[in-house]
Image (cartoon, rainbow, N blue to C red):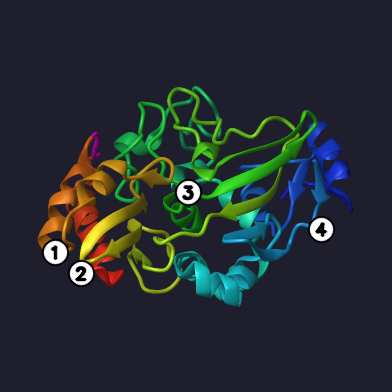
Amino acid sequence: MLPFTIEKVTSVEAAIAAASSGRRLIAGGTTLIDLMRDEVEQPQQLVDINALPLSEIRVDRSDLVMGALARMADVAAHPDVQRLHPLIAESLIEGASPQLRNMASIGGNLLQRVRCPYFRMLDASCNKRNPGSGCAARDGINAGHAILGTSDHCVATHPSDVAVALVALDATMRVKGPKGERSFPVEELFRLPGDTPHLEHTLLPGELIVEVRVPGGPNSRRARYLKVRDRASYEFALVSAAAALDVADGVIRGARLAVGGVGTRPWRMRAVEAALIGKVPDRQVFQAAARSALEGALPLSGNHYKLELLPRTIVRAFEMTGGIA
C-alpha cells in the first residue's frame, strides 16, 4: 500500500468540498482499502466521513428512508426494514459476511467497484483500471461475468446485492453536491460500460449520496431475494433475483423483478413483469414470463450456463414469494 493521508470531516458541506477538490471519501472502506492494498487504487488523500449525520433509518409515511452511512448490519436488523421491506433485509444478509456488514455503509455498497479478477491484476488488460488497454476477461476466465449490458470494452458484473433489491423496489436516492441537491432512481446511478467502462456511475464531481428512499406498496411484503453462488458462505452471485408480487383475488396485479450476477449493472426485468400482469400465478406462468429474461443476452465462452440458470432462478424466486394461488 502506498503512503496516504487521512482527515476527518463533520459536515456534509465539508465532505462535498473535499470531494470537489479531488480527495477520496471513505466510510467503511471495505472495498477501497482492499483496492489500495492491491495498488489498483492509489489515492493520496482520504477523507473520513463517518461523523456525518447520515446514518438514520426511519419511516416517512409509507416510505423507508436509509441514510447513506447506515451500516448494512443495522439496516438488515432494523424492525421497520424487516416489517416493511423484508426483501432489503434478506439481500443485505446474503450480500456480505457479518464482519463486512458491520462496517459497510449503504452508500458505499452501491458505489463499490467490480469484482472482476482482471480488474485487480495489475499485469492484466482492464479498461476499467486503464482505459484503452483492453478487456482480458472477454477471452479469459469469464464464468462469473455478465451476459447482459456488456460491450467490447467490459463484461464485468456489478457486485452489489442490495442494489438489485433497491432497483426492483423503485427506490430513489438523494444526493448533494456543489450545484445543490437532486433525487433520482437508484437504477439511474449505474452506467452501462459502453466504450467508457471506467465511468461506473452518474454522480457528478463532488456529489455525495445522502439517503436512499424506498416507497411502500403492495409489492413490498410479498418479496424474496434468491442468490445462487458457488458456495453457501460469503460469495458473489452467479445469478440472483429480487422478486415481488402483488396478488389480489388470485390474480397478479403487480410484479417487480431485478436480477444480479448477469448484468453489468443491476438489471430490471420489465418484460418479465409485464408478462405476469393479469395472470393466475403458477409455475407455468412464471416459466413463460421468465423466457423473456434472456432477450439481448450475449454469453461468453465460460458463462453459457447462465442462459439456463437465470430463468430457473427467476421462477424459483417468484415461487418463494408465496404468490402461487
Name the side, left or right, on which 225 lies relative to 174.
left
Disc on the earlier residue, 3 or 4: 4
Residue 139: within the magenta? no
Disc on the earlier residue, 3 or 1: 3
Q: Residue at x 35, y 70 (%)?
A: 231
Q: Which residues are magenta?
A: 296-300
Disc on the earlier residue, 2 or 3: 3
Q: Main secondary structure of the magenta part?
A: loop
Q: Residue at x 50, y 46 (%)?
A: 114
Disc on the earlier residue, 2 or 4: 4
Q: Which residue is mark 2?
A: 324
Q: Which residue is mark 3?
A: 170
The one of 153 and 69 positioned closer to us in this rendering:
69
The one of 123 and 182 positioned closer to us in this rendering:
182
Residue 299: within the magenta? yes
Inspect the image, locate mark 2, and give the three-letter code of the amino acid beneath it.
Ile
